[in-house]
Amino acid sequence: MSFFEVVASLVTLVALVSWVNRRWIRLPSAIGLMLISALLSLSLVALGRLGLPVAHPLLELIGAVDLDRAFLHGMLGALLFAGALHVGSEALLGHWRSIAGLATAGVIASTWLMGSAAWGLLRLIDLSVPYTACLLFGALMAPTDPVAVLAILRDAGVPKSLETKLVGESLFNDGVGVVLFISIADFGLANGTHGLSEAARFAVREIGGGLGWGALLGLIAFELLRRVDDAQVEILLTLAIVTGGYALAARLGISGPLAMVVAGLLLGDRGRRHAMSDATRARVDDFWELIDAFLNAVLFVLIGLEVAALDFPLHSIAAGLVAIPLVLGSRFLTVGLLIRVLGRGLAVEPNAVRIMTWSGLRGGIAIALALSLPQGLERDLIVATTYVVVSFSILVQGLTLGWLVRRLRD
């Protein structure tokens, strides 16, 4: 398939799946799109095994899309910028201590806890997996997914202050999780020759550089935006920040996701208030809401379709089922400990730990990171296990989050 045919097929499929969800199923977008796409994928697998040619075009589409590159090096920057743009930095400043702790210490602790527990539990079901591979699984599962969290929290009825913590954590912890994942992967592939000091320098450069680059991008964009009053030009400037800024971050070897979050937060507050007229602000909001909705739909359709290309042996399904309570338990322990430490002197919402545990959704970032692994380091097992956990996270946790919040409030 040519590039245009891939794009045309994907846009058409996303539009049809979105229409079916809105017309008949009426689930929250992220949940409905992934459910329909997963069912479509299972149908494709069945039709393909029966030798029916109707499945061939969509199976070819799945093979033509490199999800980890399309997401990590394409969609992720725009999704994070759009999410941060509609949150703004002032909403997060009052909870900065909790957000910073959850996005850093929380990710590191969850990675170690999940990796170590997975290594022990997998041995109990006669799966001997290297400790480095288990740590990789912990690193890709530790951060909550901002795309899934932002899409589902809007309809869940979570208390506003707790929603702010969850959104802030999800916006920042994916950048930390990606850096940690890359460090562990490089360490494992190099058989430990890089050393902890080099991994620490890499993390500092990625995280510190990403935060600084994002602040610089935000300030440059603000100065450019306040000198014109033309909605089309200002939309193009924000688009340039996302595409050019993210691409240059990759060239500089710093975290593009963190840069987009910081730039979006700065423009979401200061830029919207002081650099845009009311008419321009409305058009910029409409543009990025459309981009956000479209890319969310594309992402969840692609995630659902990926199942058609995966091999699911029984041992990987068993590993996924074992990993679900492991992921939830690790999140409960780390969030509970951090809330206890960081919540001293702060108002902590009732049942905050239980709500934050169940709303810690995993999504496209986890699957894209798993797919980015080269052969070796138990890649196939990690990918299949990750898909099982992500499916449970979005379909079960996402569907029941609103019910849980209402039950805990009563």
Image (spheres, rainbow, N blue to C red):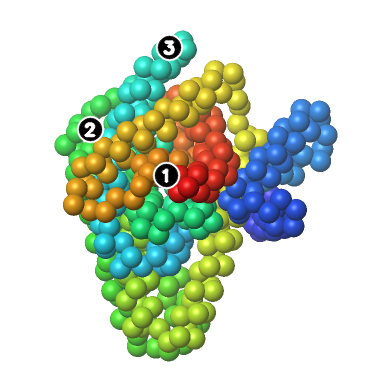
Q: Quadrant of residue 94?
A: bottom left
Q: Given the image, on which type of amino acid does mark 2 rest?
A: His
161 left or right of 30 in image? left
The correct choice, above or below, for 256 with respect to 40 in the image is below
What number is the disc on residue 344? none
The Cα–Cα distance between marks 3 and 1, rounded to whole angstroms, is 30 Å
Disc on the earlier residue, 2 or 3: 3
Q: Position of residue 382 (x, y in %)?
A: 47, 29
Residue at 32% from the left image edge and 23% from the top image edge: 116
What number is the disc on residue 355? 1
Disc on the earlier residue, 3 or 1: 3
Instruction: Please give the residue where the numbered disc 2 appears in the rendered image.
Output: 194
275 left or right of 150 in image? left
Q: Quadrant of residue 256?
A: bottom left
Q: Given the image, on which type of amino acid does mark 1 rest?
A: Ile
- SS for dot 3: helix
Residue at 48% from the left image edge and 47% from the top image edge: 410
The Cα–Cα distance between marks 1 and 2, rounded to whole angstroms, is 39 Å
Q: Position of residue 9 (x, y in %)?
A: 70, 54
Residue at 49% from the left image edge and 86% from the top image edge: 279
What number is the disc on residue 124? 3
Which class describes the residues within 10 Å of circle 1: few (<14), some (14-19), or many (20+)?
A: many
- SS for dot 2: loop
Which class describes the residues within 10 Å of circle 3: few (<14), some (14-19), or many (20+)?
A: few
Q: Position of residue 31 (x, y in %)?
A: 60, 47
The correct choice, above or below, for 401 with respect to 122 in the image is below
